[in-house]
Amino acid sequence: MTPDEMKQAAAEAALEYVESGTVIGVGTGSTANHFIDGLGRMKGKIDGAVASSVASADRLKQHGIPVLDLNQTGDLSLYVDGADEATRHLHLVKGGGGALTREKIVAAASEKFVCIADESKLVSVLGAFPLPVEVIPMARSYVARQLVKLGGEPVLREGFTTDNGNVILDVHHLEILNPVEMEELLDHVTGVVTNGLFARRPADILLLGGPEGVKSIS
Ligand code: 5RP
């Protein structure tokens, strides 16, 4: 089984959580794309979706699924999205695709967050995957210096601008032993828009695709 097939298996399992007549939140990335394609086969089951990126909005529209504005929908019952790393405590690192800010907003506004991934994403300590931090462009160097003081090695994601017009610093070599504390610390650096730690609002359910099927952790 390839990693992509494992992602697809997790995405298919998440379709079980989709209830008729609802508006759901949809994430970004290759695993979320499998989920969107699955939604496309369930034509008319949902009333629409709130997308966490322009790319996901485009894919939803291609399937004929109405894309709605979170300001119009109010809170959502379900959010489904992938992750770059996940722990058994359901803490995540996200933002490999650069959509972390909108992802965090949609997750915050959702009652249930189902995270879908292949089993290679499960780790005991977060931080081997460089932590994405979205930054206001004029604060890039200032924020980078603060990240170095916190023990990280920030690297600018070259040639990349987020859907919000900002830049991403990928922070290497952080051993994240207390994800809630680190998430709060990073959010307090002036110029940081969001960081890719999802610990204060973790996933509620983690669906991990692997050769033996899909494991659920909650
Ligand atoms: C995008 C994300 C993605 O969920 C994360 O990067 C995982 O991507 P993929 O499903 O392609 O492995 O956070 O910002």
Image: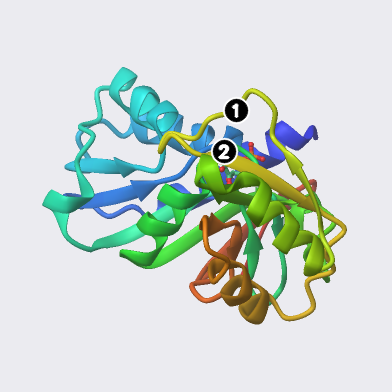
Q: Residue at x 84, y 66 (%)?
A: 151
On the image, numbered disc 2 is attached to which residue? Answer: 167
Q: Nearer the viewer, residue 189 or 96?
A: 189
Residue 218 visible: no
Q: What residue appears at the point 60 percent right and 28 percent down from the top-left corner?
A: 160
Q: Which residue is mark 1?
A: 160
The residue located at (78%, 65%) in the rendering is 126
Is ligand 1 within 8 Å of the beta carbon of the residue shown at mark 1?
A: no
Alpha-carbon distance for marks 2 and 1? 7 Å
Residue 93, image x, y percentages: 66, 58
Determine whether the residue tagged by mark 1 lies in a helix, strand or loop: loop
Q: Quadrant of residue 48?
A: top left
Q: Measured along the vertical axis of the image, is residue 35 above or below residue 190?
A: above
In the image, is residue 36 above or below residue 188?
Answer: above
Q: Position of residue 83 (x, y in %)?
A: 63, 51
Q: Depth check: 111 or 53 in front?
A: 53
**Mark 2 or mark 1, which has the lower sequence index?**
1
Q: Quadrant of ligand 1?
A: top right
Q: Quadrant of the C terminus?
A: bottom right
